[in-house]
Amino acid sequence: MDPDVETLADDDVLAGDGGEAERLEAEAELLRNRLRLAVIDIATTEGKKVGMEIADPVVACIADLAFKSAEQLAKDVELFAQHAGRKSIRMGDVILTAHRNEHLMGQLRTFCQDLKGKDPCTGKKRKKSSKKDDNVTEI
């Protein structure tokens, strides 16, 4: 088991005393801390590549911005799925959230195609042709 999860499992907040809201807040804090560690690692590595050192407050701001952006993305994706009358999120919902960022949308579509084995991924269902169209012959 992951040591961070074990630590949280032993915490009184998650033991049932505080309720669901505290458990969710503790999980969000755990995710935020893991993201912060990942950002520190990435910033340090990239800084070394170009011979720079990045200040800790800058790294903390980048980590917080990335976390808030991910939270907003999650809310948007959930709303797109709800609007479509679904309880589950699909790849098309994720692609829709990137409609304002053409580069990101292109990368997401490429990723989707790679996952699906090079099938087009537009997030839209194709209409089946009707039997009337199949029986039409040209003269």
Image (tube, rainbow, N blue to C red):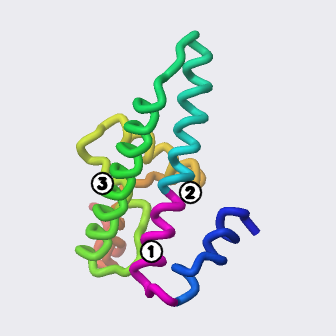
Image coordinates of residue 10 in percent, x first then y, are: 66, 77
Q: Quick one: label 1 or label 3, which is nearer the N terminus?
A: 1
The reply to whether dot 2 and dot 3 touch (C-beta < 8 Å) is no
Question: Given the image, on which type of amino acid does mark 3 rest?
Answer: Thr
Residue situated in front as seen by the camera: 137 or 78: 78
Q: Is residue 85 magenta?
A: no
Marks 1 and 2 sit apart, C-alpha to C-alpha, by: 33 Å
- Secondary structure under the numbered disc 1 in the rendered image: helix
Residue visible at 57% across and 42% down? Answer: 38
Residue visible at 66% across and 63% down? Answer: 4
Image coordinates of residue 63 in percent, x first then y, are: 44, 42
Residue receiving disc 2? 116
Question: Given the image, on which type of amino acid does mark 1 rest?
Answer: Leu
Residue receiving disc 3? 97
- Secondary structure under the numbered disc 2 in the rendered image: helix
The reply to whether dot 1 and dot 3 touch (C-beta < 8 Å) is no
Q: Residues within 10 Å of mark 3 (few under 14, many from 20)?
A: some
Marks 1 and 3 sit apart, C-alpha to C-alpha, by: 24 Å
Residue receiving disc 1? 24
Q: Is residue 27 magenta?
A: yes
Residue situated in front as seen by the camera: 68 or 20: 20
21 with respect to 1 (left or right): left
Q: Quick one: label 1 or label 2, which is nearer the N terminus?
A: 1
Question: Given the image, on which type of amino acid does mark 2 rest?
Answer: Lys
Image coordinates of residue 11 in percent, x first then y, are: 60, 76
37 with respect to 137 (left or right): right
**Magenta part of the chain:** 17-31
Residue visible at 29% across and 39% down? Answer: 101
